[in-house]
Amino acid sequence: MIEKRKRAVALRYNAEKDTAPKVIAKGSGKIAEKILQIAEEYNIPLKEDHQLVEVLSTLDLYEEIPQELYRAVAEILAFVYRMTKKVQ
């Protein structure tokens, strides 16, 4: 059986500075584990979406997400916002 490597993508969105969310980190294997570890250390909520990670992984670092992904990423951002509010 082929084991799938863990993949992760980190996004940043500042409504005051950015026109759209940007990919700020991405990777697989040990890099993905490090991205997840840093997110955990800083209490950044995580959302698993394998298909979205696959698409976002094709973008360059600091590249804004394409308009076709706005809805999917908006759902992720809404999830993060809700989780952040629960923690505070």
Image: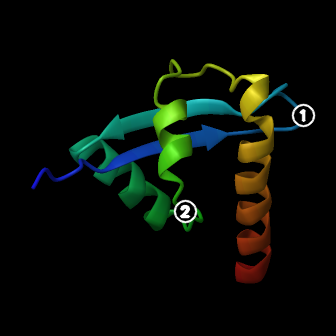
Please state which of residues 42 and 29 is positioned toward the viewer in this rendering. Answer: 29
Is 43 left or right of 87, judged from the image as shown?
Answer: left
- Residue under the image location 72 percent in, 44 percent down: 73
Contact between marks 2 and 1 (CB within 8 A): the answer is: no
Q: Position of residue 85 (x, y in %)?
A: 80, 75
- Residue under the image location 79 percent in, 29 percent down: 20
Give the colour scheme shown.
rainbow
| Residue 86, numbered label | none
Quadrant of image for the N terminus:
bottom left
Neighbor class of circle 1 (other Cα within 10 Å; few <14, some 14-19, many 20+) is few
Which mark's residue is nearer the viewer, 2 or 1? 2
What separation in Å lies between label 2 and label 1 (alpha carbons)?
23 Å
Q: Which residue is mark 1?
A: 16
The kind of residue on which mark 2 rests is Leu
- Residue under the image location 72 percent in, 22 percent down: 66
Please state which of residues 35 and 28 is positioned toward the viewer in this rendering. Answer: 28
The kind of residue on which mark 1 rests is Glu
Is 85 left or right of 64, judged from the image as shown?
Answer: right
| Residue 46, numbered label | 2
